[in-house]
Amino acid sequence: MPIIQTEALTRRFRLRTKGFRSREITAIDDLTISIEAGESVGYIGANGAGKSTTIKMLAGILVPSSGTALTCGLQPVSQRRQLARRLGVVFGQRSQLWWDLPLAESFRILAAIHDLSRDRERERTAELVENMELEEFLATPVRQLSLGQRMRGEVAVALLHSPELLVLDEPTIGLDVVSKQRLREFLLAERAAHGTTLLLTTHDMGDVSRLCERILLVDQGRLAYDGSLAGLSRTVAMRRVLVVDLAEPTPDLHDLPHAEHLGSEADGLRQRLAFDPEVTTAAALLAAVSEQAAVRDLSVEEPDVEDVVRRVYVSRGR
Ligand SMILES: Nc1ncnc2c1ncn2[C@@H]1O[C@H](COP(=O)(O)OP(=O)(O)OP(=O)(O)O)[C@@H](O)[C@H]1O
């Protein structure tokens, strides 16, 4: 049986507009998906596409307007307490931790809430503290943790009761590159060790490419793509962006091989160039830029979800 199954899942919101009028929007529209136990799925889409609304319905926080959802074989709203034993949830912008208490206390409180035996609590806490490298700040009040440390704590407590399904809403938002990478490694390790099913929303294609075997792309509440990253890459190349800082103001670099000039700032001192890593490399592009201008600094950006979504539609002629 699938671990997540929805059938024509729909959620509308009534928005108040000026005066006494109100308008209805359909945040999720006729969503039918099925996810098997053990899968790792990236749920992506532009701002306001309906990702959080879906996650909230799957977790039983929000009631659907119509259609059905089954999470771990349970009705998310009416069987929310049973579901809580089998589901872990991480919201990147909201905390499950007790801010004034040391991180270790959140483990104790949640272990009590989940009714874990003393042995189980000790064993699982030790495993998570080791895997997520939490030891050095276990005694620190949560409010004093860095964002990266706190997110590791959030993920760890969500996994304390060994849920078979972990749902993460923007788990890497705001994290620096190193913290993102660490968090991804922890999630991969947890999955390898316990076969945990992962469903995560993200704006970061790096999360998707490193963590997810399957992608669901939602646009304006509707499912727009369901398949592998490779399949999506065949539809729209997963372009990366080379950002170069040049020594002098330079006209836009339009004639570089296999690159598209996306924009310039400060009289062309900084220029952004998109390229497809399947066709060329950042090094080759940098060499081509260097023939035209002196490069002082550079960075390479991961593909942007908004850009991917936009180009899925361009490729379909919408
Ligand atoms: N409680 C609410 N009341 C009214 N409208 C809502 C509510 N929650 C969400 N919406 C609307 O539903 C739509 C989908 O929102 P949702 O938060 O699910 O999108 P999202 O894909 O998670 O976006 P983001 O990436 O910005 O978090 C948006 O138009 C949003 O304004």
Image (cartoon, rainbow, N blue to C red):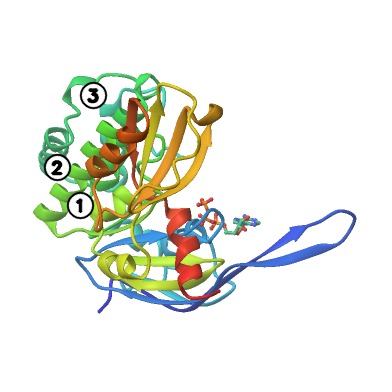
Q: Nearer the viewer, residue 295 or 38?
A: 295
Residue lying farthest to the front in this orientation: 291
Compared with residue 78, is residue 269 higher up or lower down, i.e. above or below? above
Residue at x-position 43% and y-position 54%: 305
- Which mark sits nearer the N-terminus, 1 or 3? 3
Residue 97 visible at all: no
Residue 110 x/y as whole percent: 30, 40
Residue 267 x/y as whole percent: 55, 28
- Please name the amino acid that badge 3 sits on: Leu
Residue 209 x/y as whole percent: 26, 54
Q: Is mark 2 on a helix, strand or loop?
A: helix
- Which mark sits nearer the N-terminus, 3 or 2? 2
The C terminus sits in image quarter: bottom right
Query: Where does label 2 land, which residue?
Result: 124
Q: What element carries label 1?
A: loop
Between the residue at mark 1 and the residue at mark 3, the CA separation in whole angstroms equals 20 Å
Q: In which quarter of the image is residue 21?
A: bottom right
Q: Quadrant of residue 87?
A: bottom left
- The answer to whether residue 11 is left or right of residue 297 is right
Q: Is mark 3 within 8 Å of ligand 1?
A: no
Query: Where does label 3 land, which residue?
Result: 138
Residue at x-position 54% and y-position 53%: 47
Compared with residue 206, is residue 175 higher up or lower down, i.e. above or below? above
Query: Where does label 1 land, which residue?
Result: 162
Q: Do the residues labelled 2 and 1 touch (CB within 8 Å)?
A: yes
Q: Is mark 3 on a helix, strand or loop?
A: loop
Q: Are marks 3 and 2 in contact (CB under 8 Å)?
A: no
Ligand 1 visible in quadrant? bottom right
Residue at x-position 16% and y-position 33%: 129
